[in-house]
Amino acid sequence: MTKNRRIAVIGAGIAGLGPAWQLARRGWDVEVFEAGTLGAGATSKAGGMLAPTAEATYEEEELLALELESLHAYPRWIDELQSAADVDVDYRTEGTLIVAIDRDDAEALDRLHDYHQRLGLTAERLDRSQALELEPGLSPRIHRALRVTSDVQVDPAAMLNALAVAVTRQGGTIHEECPVEALDIDDALRGLILKDGRRLPFDHVLLATGAWTPQIGGIPEGVLPHVRPVRGQMLCLGLGDPPLLRHVLRAPDAYLIPKSDGRLLVGATMEERGFDPHPTAGGFMDLLVGAWEALPGVYDAPVLDTWVGFRPITLSNHPTLGPTDIEGLYLSVGHGRNGILLAPTTAYELASWIDSGEPPEILRSFAPRSPSSPPPPAR
Ligand code: GLY
């Protein structure tokens, strides 16, 4: 039973601001609470490659369907966001090249191509000379490549700024440096308890707190999925002039993402180290060697920046999206490696569900589980 159309969104990353914007467009009164500053969480640490085909993972077809739906929604999302906010989000459509460096990689690439064909996904096989014609900076040692023209990319930090502008212009409020200690729940959801002790009444709360979700208190056991931080180190290099690279490049041990402002992002490690914020020499060495093997010109590229991000990953690798058993409490958590890609579907479909009470078909298998149901199989 809907009590009013006023909602607190906890977390000003893409998983929170997207639905917040769409709810504000539907006439909801939206207040967003962010523990740090805008971009302090995982969103602005992401590379922004939207590559469901290049990154297709065996036996993850349900997640792939959600990713493809979101990819198809991207042109509309970008149009609406850029016109709502007047912010360029560097949406680029050159596509992805996946390169095989040695024979083992080449076999893995062939298996991936077979898998693409079984799923009806389009990827074009390129021999070495065709790949070098497209990207002359590639190593002449590569065996072959796959080209995926349906993959695209954006600048996640620019998208976050655009969303913040869009939310605000639509009448929403974003409270930065305003950490939430707990949800105020007795026999029903009453609202929020802030770290400074204030209690704010809300009938509706959307939790979009990424890897930090378990730190929000007051939520009965079993309501939240198990979410953990999976650490990713990244480097930002200078792309050079003329640019070293135009396509997104997926090499066996690193991916490289050229940005229109002259940055070349190199990512990303996958590490189980909790919230350890310290980058490591080994992490950077692995990424740089992986990048250099595919694109030797990175050897001379200036290092402009480095950082560590924390992907919110669940045991099933699936995001959890929708209403919980606690009336008025909704989840948008666990987007894992796909938060930027899943932004449009998360925003449009989750807002529709919260607003109408009707579960969109595409989100049915991502709905929060009831505390009494058995845990999902870990992958
Ligand atoms: N989607 C790329 C990553 O998580 O590193």
Image (cartoon, rainbow, N blue to C red):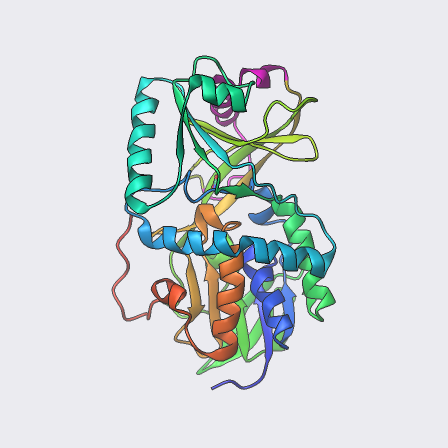
Q: Report if residue 168 is visible in the image.
A: yes
Q: Which residue is at the front of the view, 47 or 203?
A: 47
Query: What x and y, as percent, mark residue 245?
Result: 59, 26
Magenta-highlighted stretch: main secondary structure?
helix
Q: In this view, does 58 lie above or below 78?
A: above
Report the residue at 38% width, 60% height from top.
Answer: 225
* Drawn side of residue 95 relative to residue 371, left or right: right
289 magenta-colored:
yes
Q: Is residue 32 above or below residue 63?
A: below
Q: Which residue is at the front of the view, 153 or 285?
A: 153
The segment highlighted magenta reads 274-300
Report the residue at 26% width, 54% height from top.
Answer: 377
Q: Report if residue 38 is visible in the image.
A: no
Residue that protrudes farthest toward the top in the picture: 140
Query: What x and y, as percent, mark residue 21?
Result: 62, 65
Q: Which residue is at the front of the view, 166 or 241?
A: 241
Report the residue at 32% width, 18% height from top.
Answer: 103
Query: What x and y, as percent, mark residue 309?
Result: 54, 41
Query: What x and y, as percent, mark residue 149?
Result: 48, 38
